[in-house]
Image: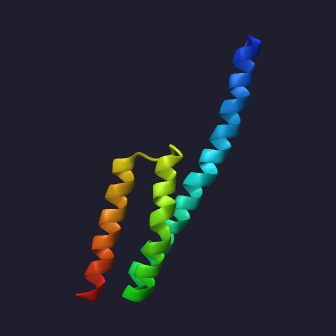
Amino acid sequence: MANTAQSKKRARQAERRTEVNKARRSRIRTFLRKVEEAITGGDQKVAQEALKAAQPEIMRGVTKGVMHKNTASRKISRLSARVKGLGA
């Protein structure tokens, strides 16, 4: 457990940041799930709209440090390919 005043404060800050990051990660997952459900539904138009809404949210996670840039790009790329494949 933290002993010094500085380490106690750092522990409190870490707790708050963890909560914020957890909420951000959950929000991103929700958007991803909506895209997945739209793809499963088979409607390309709905899937494109869901992907268009999810992209900025995913990249916001990158700027906030919740997710690595390459991870976000990979997810977007794979989802885009799957949405595009619905039309074929």
Res. 74 visible in picture: yes
Vertical order, 5 against 48 (above or below): above
The image quadrant where one finds the N terminus is: top right
The image quadrant where one finds the C terminus is: bottom left
**Residue drawn at point x = 51 percent, y = 61 percent:** 57
Res. 43 visible in picture: no
Q: Quadrant of residue 4?
A: top right
**Residue 17, horizontal then vertical, whole percent:** 65, 39
Colouring convention used in this rendered image of the protein = rainbow
**Residue drawn at point x = 39 percent, y = 55 percent:** 72
3 relative position to 63: left or right: right
As drawn, the residue found furthest toward the left would be 88
Q: Quadrant of residue 43?
A: bottom left
**Residue drawn at point x = 58 percent, y = 57 percent:** 26
Front-most of residues 56 and 17: 56
Vertical order, 50 against 22 (above or below): below
Front-most of residues 16 and 59: 59
**Residue 68, horizontal then vertical, whole percent:** 41, 45
5 relative position to 65: left or right: right
**Residue 33, horizontal then vertical, whole percent:** 49, 69
**Residue drawn at point x = 32 percent, y = 57 percent:** 74
**Residue 34, horizontal then vertical, whole percent:** 50, 73
31 relative position to 1: left or right: left
Vertical order, 80 against 43 (above or below): above
